[in-house]
Amino acid sequence: MHINQTRIFEGEYIDLVPMDASHITALIQVLGNKEIWEFTWRRITTIEQAEQLILTALDNKTSGTAMPFTMIEKETGRIIGTTRIIHPDLTHLNAEIGCTWISPEFWRSRANTEAKSLLLHYCFEELRLLRVQFSVSSYNLRSQRAVERLGGIKEGVLRRQKMKSDGTIHDNVIYSILDAEWPEVKSNLYYLLNVKYAAEKVTNLYT
């Protein structure tokens, strides 16, 4: 088994396309929204900082230390965010899913859940990983709840691990999903994507 950096993951609501230089301009516009960074340890306030995030992701793709994806809304073809698989380890069979930054316009849509579902299916069913990790700032309660809703198990807290440029100290909360837990998580993802969000969509049509 090897990492395929050209692989496109197609969902019903979004596609995950391998990030490349043609996405830089649109991603800068998305990542320039200050709301995205409010509860993270990063401080992105300029176009240059947003661009550097993307260039670093592309460098990591080249080195094989990450698989960065651009998130594209299927209906419009619009770039709405990015996510990635970090440090895929095919020797010890583990990886992290993270750096998921989505336009606030899509925060309460199915975009994040579908992105996580696509990557988790790949990690557990194709790469045959034993463990997938998520790392979330202790200040980012919204993202913690999102990981818990997927089925991530809280393992612990890395205390005072990150420092924001304004001096704020961030603990990092570590979650994981194990291969033995994947069948239950997979069923939960199916429910969220095919029942819960579908019901909410119908409700919104009539409200």
Image (spheres, helix red, strand yellow):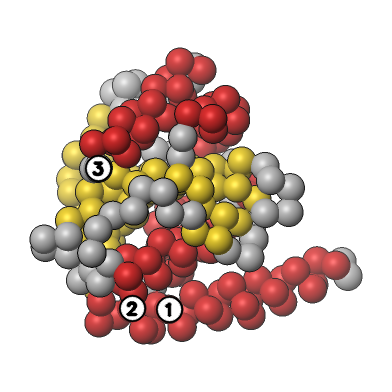
**Can you tell which quarter of the image residue 111 is in?**
bottom right
The residue tagged 3 is: 64
- Residue 40 location (% of width, % of height): 39, 38
Using the image, determine if residue 127 lies above or below residue 36: below
From mark 1 to mark 3, how far is it between C-alphas?
27 Å
The mark closer to the camera, 1 or 3, is 3
Which residue type carries mark 3? Gly
Q: Which of the numbered marks, if any, corresponds to residue 100?
A: none
Using the image, determine if residue 190 lies above or below residue 69: below
Which residue type carries mark 1? Lys
* Element under disc 3: loop
The residue tagged 1 is: 186
Between 2 and 38, the residue placed more toward the observer is 2
- Marks 1 and 3: CB-CB under 8 Å? no
* Element under disc 2: helix
Using the image, determine if residue 77 lies above or below residue 145: above
